[in-house]
Image (cartoon, helix red, strand yellow):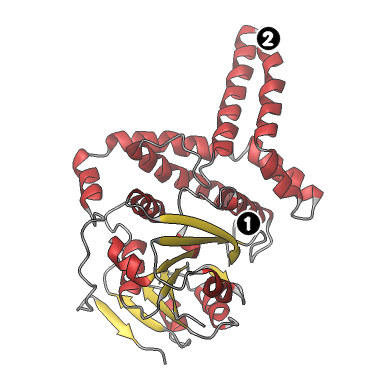
Amino acid sequence: MEKFISIVIPNYNNEGTIGQCLEAAFASDYTNFEVIVVDDHSDDGSVEIIRTFPCKLISVQKRSGTSKARNVGAQNSRGEIIFFTDADCLLQKNTLSIVNNIFPEVDTDLIIGGTYTRIPYDDSFYSIFQSEFVNYFETKSAAHPDYIAAHAMIIGSAYFKESGGFPEIFLPIIEDVEFSHRVKKAGGKLIIHPSIQVQHIFGFSLVRSLRNAFRKTTYWTMYSLKNNDLLTDSGCASKELKVDVISFVTSLFLIASWILLRKPVFLYILPVIFFSNIIINRKLFKAFYESGSSLFALKAVLYYMMIYPVPVGLGTITGVAKHFRSSKESWTKVKEHNPYNKKPAPCQLSSTVNEEEPG
């Protein structure tokens, strides 16, 4: 029996990818679904592109953020199951069929996650690195993940609406992490099925890769400090990555100490740190190798060990600084917003939301 699935996609100025995203969704080998796109007051040409597809378009007339867009889409969905994804993600032809087969017959307190394909839509080195990186760390603890990412999050419609939805007064990213943690604390169950995959359009260059690492680390650090789980092995914020950054910083310290003090003992410690890092990250490096190219694997390992720790380390420092600058009042608002034991009022279409039925 085919369950009715609602695909909810937030959009903000994604004219470069939203067309491909919707083409992939409507190319599914599954038939019983709807697509809802919530446009968060875009000022590019993405809305015109969306209107060429047979999806429900809801336009928010005031920029409100991704969380609000996802919540509005979910509240106006008709499916038994909600599939959250992003405007730069491409569903595979069999993605919805897999969801239908995996999701329980009755609505439960279960959230199912998918992940990125190992090879992204674009084939630059930095895009492949990121897709391999995310795929490995999101599926490493598939049976007991710390969170479910919203680029492939599957949840029963009734359960999502009861949960309070994504936090709308929050950091600009990692709303899915907060939602996952809140649901888990209330007794919900999380699981990742690696067979549920979306192909991401990264378009990464070196600069974009480094900027992405810095930005995500900054906000992750702010949230983790407040949540008292900075050292937790959590998806892409993994213990392996944390060891990698610590190894990099320690190595710089030892080299600087050798330069200043001219004592070779500092250099003797470097190989120990280097090979310890390799051992701890060996499964990630194996995943790089299994991408099919030894040259890619070598470049990816060097990039991960020698360059990637820089934006992650700087993002950590920035996140710590921003955390301590944040007022207690702002964090109180985050904590009080949509508590799990309060059911949110259904989202009502008002003067700030315009709905367009499929054409």
The relative height of residue 356 versus residue 243 in the rendered view (above or below) is below
Which residue reaches farthest right?
Answer: 294
Side of 300 where 103 appears, left or right: left
Inspect the image, locate mark 2, and give the three-letter code of the amino acid beneath it.
Answer: Val
Say what secondary structure mark 2 lies in: helix
* Residue located 42% across and 66% down the image: 155
* Residue located 75% across and 50% down the image: 296
- How far, Cα to Cα, is label 2 from label 1? 39 Å
Residue 45, can we see it?
A: no
Which mark is drawn over residue 38?
A: none
Where is residue 287 drawn, in percent x and y? 70, 49
Inspect the image, locate mark 1, and give the three-letter code of the amino acid beneath it.
Answer: Ser
* Residue located 76% across and 52% down the image: 290
Corner quadrant of residue 197: bottom right
Say what secondary structure mark 1 lies in: helix
The quarter of the image holding the C terminus is bottom left
The residue wearing badge 2 is: 265
Looking at the image, tell me whether mark 2 or mark 1 is earlier in sequence order: 1
Where is residue 336 drawn, in percent x and y? 21, 50
The residue wearing badge 1 is: 127
The relative height of residue 343 versus residue 285 in the rendered view (above or below) is below
Where is residue 276 drawn, in percent x and y? 67, 27
